[in-house]
Amino acid sequence: MKNRLKVLRAERDWSQADLAGRLDVSRQSVNAIETGKYDPSLPLAFRIARLFGQPIEAIFLDER
Amino acid sequence: MVERRTVTIWTYAVVAWAGALGLMAWPALVDRRLREPATGPWIVVITACATLAVVWTIVFVRLIWRRSDEYMREGSKFAWYWGGTLGLLASLPLYVFILSGGLHWLDPARFHLGRELAFAFRLGFGLAIAGQAAGFLIALAYWRWAKR
């Protein structure tokens, strides 16, 4: 699943490690989500949405 | 730089392995005659040590699971499902090869598969498969019950 995580992170000048720390996940998780190789669970997607103050569908893009 | 979470998980894994191996090896270190078939109370001691090693491992496996994030857990589930299943399936032809005297065929001077040894080998392989199958069924039943 495509997402805007990298853009949102760059806008805040956060490193992957910064974002991982704020989400309480590993840096590898952030990298895998950003590159679209791993789709986060709903609870994690909600945490990401809350952190960036945006709805989930504004961050994760349905490709269908 | 390696993350603290990763360091913690690897530390747990090393402590789990070292502790379990230590507990398993302890009877043999105390009594070197255990290379021969053990008798009497020693069988109980050896079995108790193996049980303790399992409990020790479970404690650390649980700690590792709790410390892992969902990405790591998914990776672990994928690896255990596909790696575990394919590894088990790959061992079947080896099992048949050994049981039908394959090692004796390769090196007759070193390997002899008598009736007793063949029975022990069948039992060992069967125990591993039965344990894994039983664990799978119990975990699946628990999961369905918990998510009903």
Image (cartoon, grey):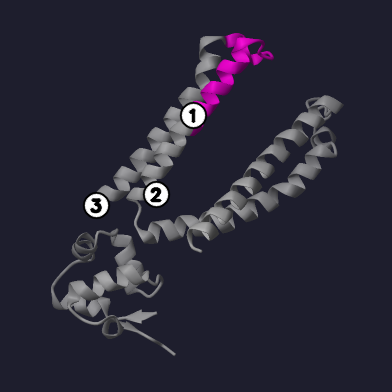
Q: Chain of mark 1?
A: B
Q: Is residue B128 above or below residue A60?
A: above
The foreground one among B101 and B40 is B40
Crowd band around label 2 with a 10 angstrom C-alpha radius: few (<14), some (14–19), many (20+): some
Q: Chain of mark 2?
A: B
Quadrant position of residue B122: top right
Q: Is residue B5 above or below residue A44?
A: above
- Label total for image: 3
Q: Chain of mark 3?
A: B
The residue type indicated by label 1 comes to Ala
Span colored in magenta:
B32-54
Kindly identify which numbered label has been placed on residue B65.
Answer: 2
Residue A6 among those drawn in magenta: no
Say whether residue B105 is visible. Answer: yes
Kindly identify which numbered label has been placed on residue B1.
Answer: 3
Quadrant position of residue A55: bottom left
Q: Position of residue B47 (x, y in %)?
A: 58, 22
Mark 1 vs mark 3: which is more N-terminal? Answer: 3
The foreground one among B139 and B25 is B139
Give the spatial CA distance, label 1 vs label 3: 33 Å
Q: Residue at x 46, y 24 (%)?
A: B22
Mark 3 vs mark 2: which is more N-terminal? Answer: 3
Crowd band around label 3 with a 10 angstrom C-alpha radius: few (<14), some (14–19), many (20+): few
The residue type indicated by label 3 comes to Met
Q: Main secondary structure of the magenta part?
A: helix
Secondary structure at badge 1 equals: helix
According to the image, label 1 marks what residue?
B53
Q: Are marks 3 and 2 in contact (CB under 8 Å)?
A: no
Say whether residue B114 is visible. Answer: no
Quadrant position of residue A4: bottom left
The residue type indicated by label 2 comes to Trp
Q: Is residue A25 left or right of residue B144?
A: left
